[in-house]
Image: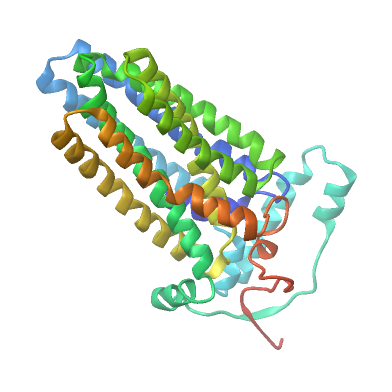
Amino acid sequence: MLMMRSIKPHLTGRSHRGRTDALILSGFPVGALLSAAVSYLVLNQLPAEWAWRVGFGLGTTMALVFFWIRRVIPESPRWLIQQGRVAEAEAIVEQVVASAARDPLAPADRAQLAKRYTPTRFAHQAPAFWRNVRELFGAYRARCALAGALNFSQAAVVYGVLSLMALVILPYLKVASTDMPIYYMIGNAAALAGGIVEAVLVEAWGRRASLFASYTFTVAAIVFIYAMHALPGMVLGYCLIQFGVTWAYISGYVVSSEILPTRIRATGLGVSVAIGRLGAVAAPLMLTSVHAMSGAPSAALVVLLVLALPGPLAAGLWWLNGRETRRISLEECCMEGGAEPAVEAAPRAA
C-alpha cells in the first residue's frame, strides 16, 4: 500500500486526483469484504485444522497480482527527472498524452495537452535517506507530524476495533467463532461506503473539511458504540466506526501524499506509516489488557477513544492553518506561504 500511495498522485490529473486516489484506496475494504466471505466459507465447510491454512493460503495468492501491476503502471515522470532520467520521463509523458488524445476531451483539456515548455537540463541529486529525514524533521516537520498523527490515529482504530470485535465484544455477546466473519462482512460493507463517500467529498468539500469531518465522525462512532450494550447496537456502532475510519484514512492518505515534495515524498510517507504502525501494535495489546483487568468492553473502548484523538486534533489544526490542495498541482501543494512553485531538481546550463 505504501508503494501505491507514493505513485498514485503522479499519475492522475489535479482536477480528479483526490477522487481517483479515494476510489483506488477503496479497494482495501473490497478485499477485506472478500476475505471475510472466504473465511466464513472455509470455517464452516472445512475441518478446523485445515480452514485457517486454506484461508491464509488464498490470501497469499493475491501477492501475485503485483507482478502484473509492476509491468503496467509507469514510473513517475517527476521522480525520473529528479534522478536525471529525462528521456524516460519524456517517453512516459508522451505515452500518456497520446493515450489521452484518443479520448473525447473539452477544448481546455486539449489545449493543456498541446502545451509544451522550454527544454531544460537538470543536475540530479542522488537519493539519500538520512538527508530526506533531516529535511522532513526540519523544513517539513509540521507536515510530517500531521501525516504521522493521522496514521497513528487511523491504524490504532482499525486494528484496535478488529481486536475488540474478535476477542472482546463478539465473545462477550456469545457469538460463535464460525459466525464472526458475517459481522466482518457487514462492517467491511460499511467501510466500502465510507470510501465511496470520501471519493465524493474530497472534491466537493475539499481536503481539509473532509479530513476533519472524517476523523471527528470516527471518534463520535466510538462514543456511540460505548453507549451500546446489545448485539444490534454494537454491530451498528462497529459499522459506523468502519465507515468513519475508512473515510478518515483515505482522507489522510490523500492529504499526506500531496503535501510533501516529490524528492522526499516516499521517505515521508514511510516515516508516517511507521508512526502509524506504533498505533497498530499498541492498540490491540492495550485494549485486550485493559479488558482483562476490567472484565467489560467499556474500559477498552475508552482507551480506543483516547488513541483515536490525535487524528481529529491534527486534522482540526490543519483545517485552520494548512493549505487546501484540491485541484492544484503537486508543485503548488508543496509551496510554503506565497512562494512560487519550484522545479525539484537543480537546473544546469545546456
Q: Residue at x 59, y 53 (%)?
A: 9
Total numbered labels: 0
- Inspect this view and state whether residue 322 appears: no
Residue 118 coordinates in the image, percent (x, y): 80, 74
Q: Residue at x 36, y 21 (%)?
A: 228
Q: Nearer the viewer, residue 300 or 14?
A: 300
State which quarter of the image contains the C terminus.
bottom right
- Inspect this view and state whether residue 295 appears: yes
Q: Residue at x 82, y 37 (%)?
A: 104
Q: Residue furthest right?
A: 107
Residue 298 coordinates in the image, percent (x, y): 28, 30
In the rendered structure, the answer to whether residue 34 lies left or right of residue 163 reads right
In the rendered structure, the answer to whether residue 149 lies left or right of residue 122 reads left
Please identify the quarter of the rendering in which residue 46 is found. Answer: top left
Q: Residue furthest bottom?
A: 349
Residue 44 coordinates in the image, percent (x, y): 21, 11
